[in-house]
């Protein structure tokens, strides 16, 4: 499928964002490990969470988690400590996203895991059993999801877990998010030093839990607002937490540099609230930023800066190469279609010095990556009639994205060649 997008001349919208898939998937694993019967409230209904719900509910021999990285990593750890034999697999892309670091660590703990096809990659054959736990050392510079997966099962290991991370730790807020959620469910888990985490063998408890909405999804609305002139846009985003543990809540700080003002409604402390975002004058003239702590915001911010003619030097992007697609290459290729020549360096940096070319305005390809579709869609504000291929990819994290755009006054037209 291909769509053509036209933007309204003014943007005024109230958007019900999806729930956080990161929090949903952690809460589901914890819920299963606690043997609980109180499902978390406001679970995300996106593909990445649906696959976890399905797997935990039906526990088939072969579990297909499709394109969900967190599901693949978290369930690998979970299945290793639950009685039963399973094969866990996913999309072709998932079969090329590395998992060796997690498998090695799980094997150190005594887990019975075999590679079904290629060494170091899914699918995996897992024979679950009781594990004793203990000390493990793993690289922290590839994906924090391996760390979160190990931490989540820590409380049910007979001797608990001591995890030592080597290298430059990436996506650290996601590790903190895991630890926070574990503690919310009664676990005893925390950093013992800058690179060591200790989880005591203290079981999870059951409780009601409300999942807050997704700050990563909010980023696309920040991008849209940033592309409107002052007084021409106002977007209200519901269900977000002010002092959120989601690392991507730093989107509000990044976009204050890009000319977007964030206001929180009065609210009870610790409760979700309404956020209103509006454009104001004066984005920065150029920007340098390290995305190590918030890699999922990189595509949104890169596209925004090009559209606003703000040269940039972005670092901390190593993990982008092993996500839904190689996001560094995908960004460079697709931005060229709309006239921006962005270059990469050291497999971990994106640099734009303002160089442009004649736009071909070919449809934007999405590479089975929800964030490619959502980060490029707002460009229709600057390029009326922008076309996007395979827009359905948004279902990975934000299935109602196009409906929300329509409700905000965008026209989305399905086109054929
Ligand atoms: O733990 C999580 O919920 C996530 C961690 C991050 O992955 P990496 O740790 O691989 O960067 C992030 O990109 C992903 O979308 C969600
Ligand atoms: C990288 C992402 O997800 P995952 O790694 O969980 O597939 C994402 O949602 O941007």
Image (cartoon, rainbow, N blue to C red):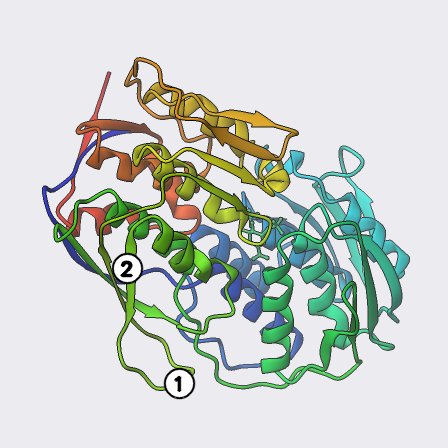
Indicate if the residue with disc 1 has its beta carbon within 8 Å of ligand 1.
no
Front residue (pair 104, 372): 372
Q: Position of residue 49 (x, y in %)?
A: 49, 58
**Vertically, is 317 above or below 400?**
above
Nearer to the camera, 29 or 321: 321
Quarter of the rendering occupied by the C terminus: top left
**What residue appears at the point 40 percent right and 39 percent down from the top-left corner?**
393
Q: Is residue 373 visible?
A: no
Q: Quadrant of residue 159?
A: bottom right
**Residue 297 position within the rendered picture, expressed as x and y whole percent measured from the top left:** 46, 48
Residue drawn at (61%, 27%), measured in percent from left and top?
345
Q: Which residue is mark 2?
A: 261
Q: Nearer the viewer, mark 2 or mark 1?
A: 2
- Which secondary structure, mark 2? strand
Q: Residue furthest left?
A: 9
Spot occupied by residue 143 in the image (x, y as percentages of width and height): 67, 49
**Quadrant of res 357:** top left
Which residue matches tag 1? Answer: 269
Residue at 72%, 77% in the rendered image: 189
């Amino acid at each position: 499928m291909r769509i053509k997008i036209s933007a309204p001349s003014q943007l005024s919208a109230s958007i019900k964002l999806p729930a956080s898939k990161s929090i949903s998937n952690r809460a589901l694993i914890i819920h299963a490990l606690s043997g609980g019967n109180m499902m978390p409230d406001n679970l995300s209904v996106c593909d990445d969470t649906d696959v976890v719900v399905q797997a935990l509910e039906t526990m088939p021999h072969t579990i297909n988690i499709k394109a969900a990285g967190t599901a693949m990593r978290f369930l690998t750890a979970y299945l290793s400590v639950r009685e039963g034999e399973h094969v866990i697999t996913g999309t072709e892309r998932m079969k090329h996203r590395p998992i060796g670091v997690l498998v090695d660590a799980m094997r150190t703990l005594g887990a019975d895991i075999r590679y079904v096809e290629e060494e170091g990659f899914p699918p995996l054959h897992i024979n679950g059993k009781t594990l004793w736990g203990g000390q493990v050392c793993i690289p922290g510079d590839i994906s924090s999801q391996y760390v979160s997966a190990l931490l989540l099962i820590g409380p049910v290991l007979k001797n608990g877990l001591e995890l030592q991370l080597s290298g430059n730790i990436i996506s650290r807020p996601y590790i903190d998010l895991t630890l926070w959620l574990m503690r919310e469910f009664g676990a005893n888990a925390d950093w013992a030093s800058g690179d060591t985490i200790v989880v005591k063998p203290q079981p999870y408890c059951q409780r009601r839990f409300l999942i807050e909405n997704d700050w990563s999804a909010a980023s696309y609305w920040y991008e849209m607002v940033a592309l409107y002139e002052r007084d021409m846009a106002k977007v209200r985003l519901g269900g977000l937490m002010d002092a959120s543990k989601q690392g991507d809540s730093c989107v509000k700080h990044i976009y204050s540099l890009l000319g977007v003002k964030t206001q929180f409604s009065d609210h009870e402390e610790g409760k979700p609230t309404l956020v209103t975002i509006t454009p104001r004058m004066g984005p920065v003239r150029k920007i340098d930023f390290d995305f190590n702590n918030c890699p999922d915001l990189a595509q949104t911010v890169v596209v925004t800066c090009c559209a606003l003619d703000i040269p940039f030097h972005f670092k901390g992007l190593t993990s982008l190469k092993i996500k839904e697609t190689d996001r560094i290459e995908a960004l460079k290729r697709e931005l060229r279609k709309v006239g921006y020549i962005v270059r990469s360096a050291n497999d971990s940096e994106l640099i734009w010095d303002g160089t442009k070319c004649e736009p071909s305005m070919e449809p934007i390809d999405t590479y089975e990556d929800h964030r490619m579709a959502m980060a490029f869609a707002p460009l229709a504000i600057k390029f009326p009639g922008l076309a996007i291929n395979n827009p359905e990819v948004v279902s990975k994290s934000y299935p109602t994205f196009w409906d929300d755009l329509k409700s905000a006054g965008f026209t989305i037209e399905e086109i054929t060649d």
